[in-house]
Amino acid sequence: MHGITRCPQCKTAFNVDHKHLLPANGKVRCGACKHTFNAADHWVVADVDDADLDFERPTLSLQTSTKSVWQSLTLGLIITISALMVFIQWLHKHPSITNHLPELEQPRLEMYRWLSQTAPSPIDWSKLELRHYIAQTHPDNPSILRVQGLIINHSKIAQPQPDLLLSIQLADGTVHNARIAQKYIVRKQQKLRGQRQSQFYFDIDRPRQAIETFSLAMCCQQKN
């Protein structure tokens, strides 16, 4: 006996001899698209009683299918949220990564603003070192004091240049502290490249009294 079945994928209909269905457990392959399916589930015209075919057709359970879809969606959501939390924690511990990936800086700031928290500085202070700084009279103008030195970035990632904090003690014991903002500091580059050093200098009015001691330190950035 023969029957006509239709491919569920390309909708091609073709004849099937039921004697070929028994050894294949009811499965046929479409000659047009090569899709394999159960012929008895897609009969167009059947000259054979399905009961005469000695094979079992799988049953479709809509309840099981729906449950499986919701389980997959729930699992996917849990994995996504977990990955996002891990990323946020990593970014919180390594804020200086935004110096290498500047496109992350604005989302990072928005995240802390949404949480009503203060974003950590993108500068990794443990990797910065201030060296060889001196203060001397400007060679072309005796009324100006020029302070110059080096900042070394030991990190492999580029970092923003920090502001500087100057402290001067005069001969009469007076102490002057001044924060030297970015716009007053002359540098060779705006960012400290990874594992590189950067020269800098800035000029201030020379004190009338002699300078007993002076010190220079790095301090956090601020917008000027």
Image (cartoon, rainbow, N blue to C red):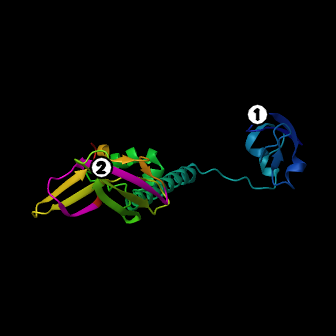
Residue that label 2 marks: 138
- First in sequence: mark 2 vs mark 1: 1
**Residue 220 shows in this picture:** no
Residue 210 percent across, percent down from the top left: 17, 59
Amino acid type at circle 2 is His
**Residue 179 shows in this picture:** yes
Residue 101 percent across, percent down from the top left: 47, 49
Q: In this rendering, is residue 14 above or below 190? A: above
Q: Does the magenta-highlighted stretch encompass residue 153? A: no
Tell which of 60 and 179 is nearer to you: 179
Q: Does the magenta-highlighted stretch encompass residue 209? A: yes
Tell which of 89 and 48 is nearer to you: 89
Q: Residue at x 28, y 61 (%)?
A: 217
Q: Residue at x 83, y 41 (%)?
A: 30
Considering the numbered disc 2 on the image, is that residue within a helix, a strand or a loop?
Answer: loop
Residue 100 percent across, percent down from the top left: 48, 51
Residue that label 1 marks: 11
